Amino acid sequence: MKHPRTVLVLIGSAVVFVGSAMARDDGRYANSPLKSWFDSLKSGKGPCCSDADGSAVADVDWESKDGHYRVRLEGQWIDVPDDAVITEPNRVGRTMVWPIKGTLGITIRCFLPGSMT
């Protein structure tokens, strides 16, 4: 059995995490004609959440080589797992990424390639 203090710390951390995730969706995209499309996006890793959770990526910060993608986040190049790539047509045109920061660094949950203009 876990120590009661450890359980409280874990519960407190979960509440802070859920609160911060909910705070990111501040309603600014509620009336966007693409909101339902963003909300439905998913990769092989699962749902991507919504536009509020994703980040646009400048053309100089992503590339495709040998059929695989990589993206530069926080100054480092990160390989995009093949199952994180969204394969449906990009309705916004710009490249987007849904990164997850964890104890082992940044991983990519979803990646939507753009038109690279």
Image: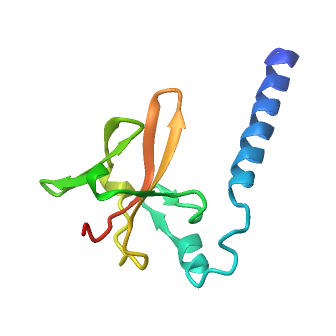
**Is residue 99 left or right of 14 when viewed as pictured?**
left
Residue 66, x across and y down, in percent: 12, 54
**Is residue 62 left or right of 27 when viewed as pictured?**
left
- Write down the quadrant of residue 90 in the picture: bottom left
Determine the residue located farthest toward the left in the rendered image.
66
- Write down the quadrant of residue 105 in the picture: top left
- At a point 59% along the width and 85% down the height, the residue shown is 33
Residue 14, x across and y down, in percent: 75, 37
**Is residue 66 left or right of 23 when viewed as pictured?**
left
Q: Say if residue 108 shows up in the picture.
A: yes
Q: For the image shown, how many numbered marks are present on the structure?
A: 0
**Is residue 87 left or right of 53 when viewed as pictured?**
left
Residue 74, x across and y down, in percent: 42, 37
- At a point 32% along the width and 64% down the height, the residue shown is 113
Which quadrant, please, contains the N terminus? top right
Determine the residue located farthest toward the bottom in the rendered image.
33
- Write down the quadrant of residue 32 in the picture: bottom right
Which quadrant, please, contains the C terminus? bottom left
